[in-house]
Image (spheres, coloured by chain):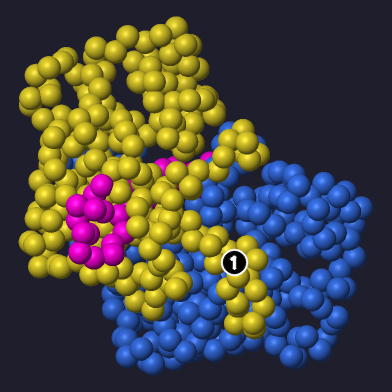
Chain colours: A blue, B yellow
C-alpha cells in the first residue's frame, strides 16, 4: 500500500454550524456528511480545522482578564505585541524560539515550533454564554490533546469503516512566506509516510523519501476550506491509499535535540 | 474571487514517458490529457514535477567527472557527504545555511533554503545518449529558471483557457519531519494568496491570512503523484478558484534580510 493515488477528491462539508463549547463534533460532522449525501468509505480521511476542536473544548481565554507577567512585559517590549497576548502565548509554550519586532515564535507545549503558540487573537468570538462570563476580547488556544481527540473522533465516526482523521491548523514557515496547512493531530493515517525501501522506476531503492503525509492532507483541506469560513471547517478527502496506522501528529515534530536552527 | 472551493479534484495524468533532454513537455502533457480524456478548463492547474523539467532541460551532472574544491572537501568532512556531491551542491548555491553531520542546507541560487540544493543524487538515471558522454554516476539539478518555464508551459498548454501552472519539488522543513511539496515555479496562479481584507464569519477583517497557495497546490500533487513513479509526474487540479495573476514562485522565498533563523 502506498500513499499515492491516481485521483483524489476533497469535499468541504456544507452547512456546519459555528461550534460552541460542549458540542459533539462527531455528531456535527455526521450531520454534514448526511447533508452532502456522503457515506464514509474505507480510506476516507476527515480533516477538521483545529478551531472547531478548540471551540468544542471551550479553549477561550479572556484577554481582558489576563495579567501579564514581568517576562511577558519584557517580550512585549521586544516584539511590539500586546503584553496580555504575550502572556497567553507564554502559558501555551515550553520554550522561546525567536523574538523580534512583530515576531514571537515559540515551541508549543504540543512540541510544534509555531508563531504566537498558534493562539487565535483575531477570530475567536465566543458564544454569548462564554462572553457573558468575562470582559473580552477573547483569544482561542489550540486544542488540549489533538492526537487523542483524533483517535476519539475516528472511533466515533468510523466505527464501521477504516478512516483517517486529521486535525489541522495553518502554520507559517521560517524560510518561506505564506501559511500552509499543518497537522496537529491525527489518527488512522500515518503522520509520516516512509517510502524508503520502495524502488524507483529504474529499480534502485529510494533513500530519502519520508513524506509528511498528514501535513499534506492538511494542506489539501486548507485549499478547499478557506480559513475565513468556519462553516467549511471539515473536509473529506477521498482517494488516498495509506496503511492504517501511524503514531499521531506528534511524530511530525522534529525533536528539539535535532533542531539545528535552535 | 477566493482561493477556496467546496470541491477539489486532483488527477495524475497517465502514461507519461520518462523525459529525455530536448523533449517538449507541453507536447507530452497534452498527450497525457488526451489519454485521460481530459480537456483543460478555465481554472485548472497543472502541477509538473521539477524532475521532468530538469530532465527535459538536460540538467544532468556527471558526479564521476566532478572535481571537488578545497571548500567542498572541508564541508564533506563536516557533513560526511561525498566531496563530489558537495561540490555540485555548492555550484548550485549562493550561501551556506547549516552544515552538520548528515546535513547540508544552503540557499539555492533560486532563493530557496533547501537541503543539498535540491540536487537529486539517487534517482537521476540519464538516457543512454547522455550516459555515454560521461562516467557517472549522475546527479540531476533543479531547473534553470522554473518561473520562466512555468510561463512558457502555460502559454503552450493553456492558450485557449485561463489555467495555472506550478512546477513542484519536495522539500524538508527545519522544525518538522518529513518532506512536503513546494512550488519552485508558477504562472497564472498566485504563489501567495493574500486573504487580508476578507471578513471572517463575524464580519471582522482577517489580519494574518496570506496563504502559500502554490506550495499547497504542490502538496496536493505530491499526495497524488508519489515521488517514486515518474510516470505520474504531472497532476491536474480542478476546482480551485483563484485570481489569474501572481508573480511566480520566487515570491514564496522569505528574503534573506528577513531570515530570523539565519
Q: Tell me if residue A154 comes above or below residue A212 in the rendering.
A: below
* Residue A95 position (above or below residue B110): below
Tell me where the magenta segment starts and ends, as one range. B152-181
> Can residue A105 be spotted in the picture?
yes
Q: Secondary structure at mark 1?
A: loop
Quadrant in the picture for the C terminus of chain A: top right
Q: Position of residue A52 (x, y in %)?
A: 57, 77
Does residue A245 lie above or below B176 as drawn? below
Q: Quadrant of the N terminus of chain A?
A: bottom left
Res B232 visible: no
Pointer 1 residue: B196
Q: Was residue B167 drawn as part of the magenta stretch in this picture?
A: yes
Given residues B67 and A92, the one toward you in this image is: B67
Name the spot of residue B87 as percent of width and height, x first: 38, 17
Chain under disc 1 = B
Image location (x, y in percent) of residue B32: 12, 57
In this image, A225 relative to B23: left or right? right
What residue is drawn where x is 37% and y is 10%? B68
B204 or A187: nearer the viewer: B204
Q: Position of residue B213 (x, y in %)?
A: 44, 59
Residue at horizontal 32 percent and vertical 90 percent from the top: A37
Q: Nearer the viewer, residue A132 or B132?
A: B132
Magenta stretch encompasses residue A70: no
Q: Residue at x 51, y 68 (%)?
A: A167
Q: Is residue A56 left or right of residue B92?
A: right
Amino acid at each position: 500500500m502506498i500513499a499515492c493515488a491516481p485521483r483524489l477528491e476533497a469535499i468541504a462539508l456544507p452547512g456546519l454550524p459555528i461550534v460552541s463549547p460542549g458540542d459533539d463534533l462527531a455528531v456535527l460532522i455526521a450531520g454534514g456528511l448526511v447533508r452532502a449525501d456522503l457515506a464514509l468509505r474505507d480510506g476516507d480521511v476527515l480533516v477538521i480545522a483545529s478551531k472547531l476542536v478548540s471551540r468544542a473544548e471551550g479553549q477561550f481565554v479572556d484577554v481582558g482578564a489576563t495579567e501579564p507577567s514581568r517576562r511577558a512585559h519584557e517580550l512585549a517590549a521586544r516584539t511590539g505585541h500586546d503584553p496580555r497576548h504575550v502572556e497567553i502565548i507564554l502559558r501555551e509554550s515550553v520554550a522561546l524560539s525567536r523574538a523580534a519586532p512583530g515576531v514571537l515564535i515559540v515551541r508549543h507545549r504540543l512540541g510544534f515550533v509555531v508563531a504566537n503558540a498558534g493562539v487565535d487573537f483575531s477570530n475567536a468570538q465566543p458564544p454569548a454564554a462564554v462572553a457573558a462570563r468575562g470582559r473580552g476580547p477573547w483569544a482561542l488556544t489550540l486544542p488540549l490533546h489533538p492526537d487523542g481527540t483524533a483517535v476519539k473522533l475516528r472511533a466515533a465516526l468510523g466505527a464501521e469503516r477504516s478512516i483517517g482523521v486529521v486535525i489541522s491548523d495553518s502554520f507559517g514557515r521560517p524560510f518561506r512566506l505564506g501559511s500552509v496547512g499543518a497537522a496537529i493531530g491525527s489518527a488512522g493515517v500515518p503522520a509520516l509516510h516512509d517510502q524508503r525501501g520502495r524502488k524507483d522506476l529504474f529499480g534502485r531503492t529510494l533513500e530519502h523519501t519520508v513524506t509528511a503525509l498528514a501535513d499534506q492532507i492538511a494542506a489539501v483541506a486548507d485549499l478547499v476550506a478557506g480559513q475565513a469560513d468556519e462553516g467549511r471547517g471539515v473536509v473529506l478527502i477521498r482517494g488516498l491509499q495509506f496503511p492504517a496506522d501511524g503514531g499521531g501528529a506528534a511524530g511530525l515534530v522534529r525533536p528539539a535535540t535535532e533542531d539545528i536552527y535552535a
